[in-house]
């Protein structure tokens, strides 16, 4: 188990930006329960920032904010007036801090943090007006916004704040992070995945499964997706998510999926799958073809963003999953796919490829460079005909066999996606 505070890799990046002169809003965005609030707590604490140099607002009261070592201001009601009032107080405090006698006042800008900002109605327009005013007045104040999922933040950023922000994406925890912070072995990570809040429950699988379902999956769907977007068939989205978890690592045409889901229309399923992807839960990878239209028309390859979702939603326990070679192989492939999705930068696209009987598990595309990745989850040798055929058609492609002696799974999971396209 964890021996002390663990700071994720994004922490030093945020700390450096908060030491600069304020120029852009900093957005810390990611799925639920990946540690966004904890990260900000740690950065503020480790920078030795005194209480007089910060304001911390939480637009959705939470036990973590209430119990942390910092003084989070929580609303009696969540509305625009509350946000405007608290922002004004922060501006006054920022000016006082800047002109104070504290030794760090001239080198450590004031910080205003707003957690769960998307809970405030019309938040993006309000923040735009307040930020522009603060900039015009020369108020030396950083603003950090946190959101529980990329889709929630993006619903406001694309409307009002273009050119005024930088995004710091905090994804699901990697194998390296879960291993260092909680001591998870590779096999444990492949099954139990990367949710830090569930790490203490691994000894009681029934309790772990209930926690992941009720405290992580349900709020992500019910509070985030359903509250922010109109979902005409919420029961269908839940069923699609469950189906996608059971088929993670497999290609399934949406018309066939619709048959399993009561005849749902393909367009509806495509829209709902996109929502699940934005929420950091489940994606449908598209076939690589070099042509966007053909990619969109191809059947998706379902891929969870965290293998904990497969364990929590499935019928296999840890020991049973290890004993079933076919299921364990899909867990390994899903862990590799989730890692690629979670670590891919903005220039990197994750696909699969198939033509007849020839198939490649993953194709990475970054700035015209291709990498073909085949996952080998057991000791049985194969000829990898698919990857050979893909490289014949695309000779400059880089080849990688994950699970081979040259690239063990654990080693692969310690490196970001773009490393394979450099």
Image (cartoon, rainbow, N blue to C red):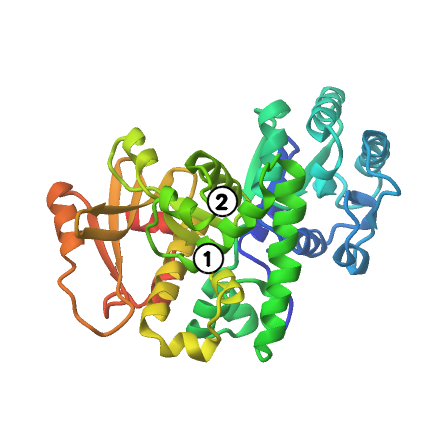
Which quadrant is home to the N terminus?
bottom right
Measured as percent of width and height from the top left, residue 357 is found at 17, 52
In three-dimensional space, the C-alpha distance between marks 1 and 2, rounded to whole angstroms, equals: 12 Å
Measured as percent of width and height from the top left, residue 143 is found at 70, 36
The answer to whether 297 is drawn above or below residue 234 in the figure is above
The answer to whether 38 is drawn above or below residue 271 in the figure is below
- Name the residue beneath numbered marker 1: 245
Measured as percent of width and height from the top left, residue 180 is found at 52, 69
Q: Which mark is residue 269?
A: none
Viewer-proximal residue, 9 or 409?
409
Q: Secondary structure at mark 2?
A: helix
Measured as percent of width and height from the top left, residue 153 is found at 62, 37
Viewer-proximal residue, 152 or 412?
152
The answer to whether 218 is drawn above or below residue 103 in the figure is below
Q: Residue at x 58, y 24 (%)?
A: 162
Front disc: 1 or 2: 1
Mark 1 crowd level (few <14, some 14–19, many ≥20, 10 Å Cα): many
Which quadrant is home to the C terminus?
top left
Report the residue that reaches farthest toward the right: 76
């Amino acid at each position: 188990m964890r021996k002390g505070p663990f700071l994720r890799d994004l922490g030093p990046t945020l700390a450096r930006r908060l030491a600069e002169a304020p120029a852009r809003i900093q957005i810390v965005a990611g799925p639920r329960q990946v540690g966004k609030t904890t990260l900000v707590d740690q950065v503020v604490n480790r920078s030795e920032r005194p209480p007089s140099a910060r304001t911390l607002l939480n637009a959705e009261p939470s036990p973590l904010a209430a119990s942390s070592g910092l003084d989070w201001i929580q609303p009696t009601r969540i509305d625009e007036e509350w946000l405007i009032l608290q922002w004004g107080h922060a501006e006054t405090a920022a000016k006082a801090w800047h002109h104070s006698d504290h030794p760090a006042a001239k080198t450590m800008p004031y910080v205003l943090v707003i957690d769960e900002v998307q809970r405030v109605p019309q938040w993006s327009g309000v923040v735009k007006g307040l930020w522009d005013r603060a900039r015009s007045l020369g108020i030396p104040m950083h603003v950090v916004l946190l959101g529980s999922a990329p889709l929630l933040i993006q619903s406001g950023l694309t409307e009002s704040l273009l050119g005024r922000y930088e995004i710091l994406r905090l994804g699901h925890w990697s194998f390296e992070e879960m291993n260092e912070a909680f001591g998870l072995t590779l096999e444990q990570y492949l099954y139990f995945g990367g949710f830090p809040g569930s790490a203490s429950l691994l000894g009681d699988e029934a309790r772990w499964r209930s926690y992941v379902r009720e405290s992580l999956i349900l709020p992500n769907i019910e509070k985030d997706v359903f509250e922010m977007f109109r979902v005409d068939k919420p029961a269908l989205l839940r069923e699609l998510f469950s189906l996608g978890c059971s088929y993670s690592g497999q290609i399934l045409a949406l018309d066939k999926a619709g048959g399993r889901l009561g005849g749902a229309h393909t367009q509806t399923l495509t829209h709902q799958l996109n929502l699940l992807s934005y929420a950091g839960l489940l994606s449908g990878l598209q076939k690589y073809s070099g042509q966007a239209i053909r990619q969109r028309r191809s059947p998706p390859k379902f891929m969870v963003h965290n293998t904990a979702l497969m364990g929590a939603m499935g019928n296999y326990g840890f020991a049973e999953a290890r004993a079933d070679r076919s299921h364990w192989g899909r867990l390994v492939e899903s862990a590799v796919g989730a890692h690629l999705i979670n670590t891919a930068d903005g220039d990197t696209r994750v696909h699969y490829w198939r033509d007849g009987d020839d198939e490649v598990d993953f194709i990475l595309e970054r700035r015209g460079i291709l990498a073909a990745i085949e996952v080998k989850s057991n000791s049985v040798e194969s000829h990898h005909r698919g990857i050979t055929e893909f490289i014949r058609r695309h000779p400059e492609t880089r080849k990688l066999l994950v699970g081979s002696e040259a690239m063990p799974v654990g080693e692969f999971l310690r490196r970001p996606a773009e490393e394979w396209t450099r």
